[in-house]
Amino acid sequence: MIRLIVLRLLAAVPVMLVVATFVFLLLRLSPGDPALVVAGEQATPEQVEQIRRDLGLDRSLPVQYVTWLSQMAQGNFGASTLSGQPVLDLIADRVEPTLVLALVTIVVTVVIAVPLGAIAAWHHDGWRDRMVMTLAVVGFSVPSFVIGYTLMQLLALKANLLPVQGYISPFDDPLQSLKHLVLPAATLAIVFMALISRVTRASTLEILGEDFIRTARAKGGNENRILWKHALPNAAVPVVTVIGLGIASLISGVVVTESVFNIPGLGRLTIDAILGRDYPVVQGLILVFSLTYVFINLLIDITYLIVDPRIRY
Amino acid sequence: MSFSRLAAIALATALVAAPLAAQEQKVLRMVPHASLRLLDPLTTTAYVTRNHGYMVYDTLFGYDENYVPQPQMVSDWSASEDGLTYSFTLRPGLAFHDGAAVTAADAVASLQRWMTRDLTGRKIAAVLGAITADSDTEFTISLTAPFGSLVEALAKPSSVVPFIMPKRIIDAAGDGNVEEIIGSGPYRFVAEEFRPGVSAVYVKNENYVPRDEAPSYLAGKKDVLVDRVEWLTFPDDQTTANALTKGEVDLVEAISSDTLSMIEGAPGVEYDLRITSNTPTLRINWLQKPFDNPKMRQAVAAMISQDDFMAATVGDPETYEVCGSLFGCDSPLATDVNALGTSAPDPEKAKALMAEAGYDGEKVVILDASDILSFRGLAPITAQYLRDAGMNVEVQSMDFSTYLAQRNKQDPVSEGGWSIAFGVWNSPDLMSPLSNLNLDTEGAKGYAGWSSDDQLASLKEDYARASSPEEQKAIAEKIQARANDLVFFVPLGTYRTYTAYRDNVTPPLPAPVSVFWGIDKN
């Protein structure tokens, strides 16, 4: 396993280099000019030129690229063109809300969606199966901002049970933090639960048709034990894969949810940086997201080894 | 219980409660109209940074409600008879947030920097002989030619505002941005709590010395009645409205008529129309065909009806007006001379002008910043009117950053250039011919649209030299007549937005830009 981890981490280096180069070029080739954004709508050409010089955007593309790469090699991600603050500081400031929101969402999803999927498979074609699948289709089909606003209207404004917006760190005030997380986490989890429950159901159904399940039943095994002890663990590999992919897709999901619930996380930072053509921040964020993907894939592979000892790398 | 025991308990309670009460701060949670990222108000023309500037910095002069410049940091000033020498004395007791006294040297350094970064400032720089600090509190501006609008320029209310900063910070910045946000204004910026794009925090400047006069727009007393102001950026209007309804924020700087419908009737929420008005403007590319021909620009103007634009983009007739003045209808210079856009579209006139210009179906590209609410609708409506007149129109929609870059391109339409674009301006930006960028006459070196005209440039110089309001008004009318003949820009109407607040907060003071002094919270 250690060999796997080391190899994967080594393989991540060229991946990150390719991603970095691609993002650098993509941003420079896309329309827009950071100097114009900084200067504002009413700026004169002289003001824009001055800012362009200050930001180093008057230098040639290869010079900008080499400068950026050499800074990166020293762990310097540069400074935001909009605020002048170091990119790493900006990202570090926004990591916690996104991470906490994602973790709560994943835990809630897995705890609810996996059993739901297993129960649906066990009662295949019964009312419980149809109910779970109907909820899954609804959860998958309704846009997350609609879910968010509906929950906000019902639970925050009408019932006055929860706050409308904002983020409080669990390290500052755990109870208030939880209150602020309920609505955004539920908004994200509904879509995620729909996906996981469907995959769990399909995978469990397949396992339930296997010979060893028939054998267990023929031996008079307890039905609950057959489902939870024999079928579900064997159905885990595709479920783990989808959970991993789901975590990755959460990154895009939080963009909308963070806007709706005014959570100052990485999603909002990404949108602001892209709209403001804040090249250093976008580059830094994409690298962080890429690293996250690499890390999640590594975690998935390690989980495979744990849930299915037959797998070898 | 004995009396002495009761007294002891009462004393103990008072001792515990007193510090608690002292700690209870008045905190105003405000949602600004945009997110604050740039802190140096001389680096950008963004209105949110300008408003931040008014929190932290003070100005030498400020406009009162009659748009007359009144001394603010200045106690006395005088001009020589020939209009070439201006002397100023600073008020006693002015201090920066770091404790240093505000000196004439700080004012001189601040004005010198402003003169390199502002359109009006550069006009003064062109006739500047010298600007010198004569003592700790006195400084002099000597000119090589009269500039009658000098004090008006020093009171410039909108971007770029001549805010006064410490000389040491200006010197440290060189050509770049100031690093320390230290002013002498009514609030102190809390740098360690600043989160770009998320929140900014200001605390009361306990050492601020307000003027004695009653507050009047940007002049007079700047009383700070709360201990702390938090600017909280909201990325979504619906969430902003919900947060105000629920009392999670106290004040929303600006909301549109559409958003107002979400909070109307909500308990504990009040709202007012703001003094600040906004004017969307249509700007034409003078460098490229077909609009290098003035007849074609006049054809566009003939098709513009401000009333139609306002009805379609703003909707609520209570909040908009048709205004024929290029300087805004609140301006002392307001005039209807040769007004554009105040009558119904005239396709016949437009077609006749197009025929005179020899229009041959050249493509007209209209840029549309579709992600900005205040720009929404402007491009499609213009396109429809110009098609009605027989022009070959293409609308190109894009996000605002792309729009800014695209609008900067001087190329022909066939090579990715543009024909018509838009801007949206706060009223103070239009009110003077010197600061109104749409009246730029620098051609290809100037503001996007690249208008140029020697006669208008000469009229603007006359305006700068004019020494009385009557003389200024007379010249402004000539400027408007000439600018509209050549169609420098077409105003598309004037509208106001609302400010909304909880009922335990006093309404913001009226001013042509958003100000946050004089607000109390109970």
Image: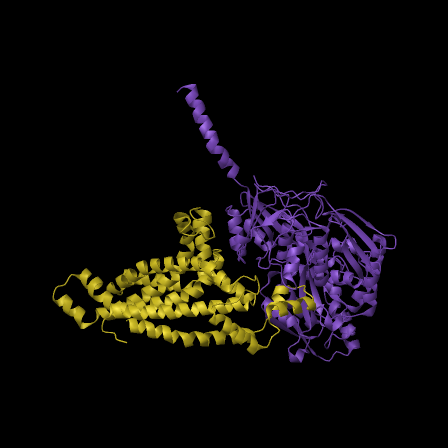
The x, y position of residue B385, in whole percent, is 69, 69
Residue B384 showing in the rendered view: no
Residue A219 showing in the rendered view: yes
Q: Quadrant of the N terminus of chain B?
A: top left
Q: Is residue B155 above or below residue A69?
A: above
Q: Quadrant of the C terminus of chain B?
A: top right
Measuring 29% from the left and 71% from the top, which residue is drawn there? A2
Residue extending furthest front? B135
The residue nearer to you, when weighing B138 against A46, is: B138
* Quadrant in the picture for residue B438: bottom right
Q: Colour of chain B?
A: purple
Q: Quick check: B506 left or right of B112?
A: left
Measuring 70% from the left and 48% from the top, which residue is drawn there? B218
Q: Quick check: B482 left or right of A150?
A: right
Q: How many callouts does the rendering have?
A: 0
* Quadrant in the picture for residue B309: bottom right
Q: Is residue A270 above or below residue A171?
A: below
Q: Colour of chain A?
A: yellow
The residue nearer to you, when weighing B386 against A205, is: A205
The residue nearer to you, when weighing A133 against B106, is: B106
The x, y position of residue B274, in whole percent, is 65, 50
Q: Is residue A276 above or below residue B131?
A: below
Residue extending furthest right? B81
The x, y position of residue A78, in whole percent, is 52, 67
The x, y position of residue A161, in whole percent, is 42, 47
Q: Quick check: B372 left or right of B354?
A: left
How was the colour assigned to the protein in this rendering?
by chain
Q: Quick check: B336 left or right of B256?
A: right
Residue extending furthest top? B2
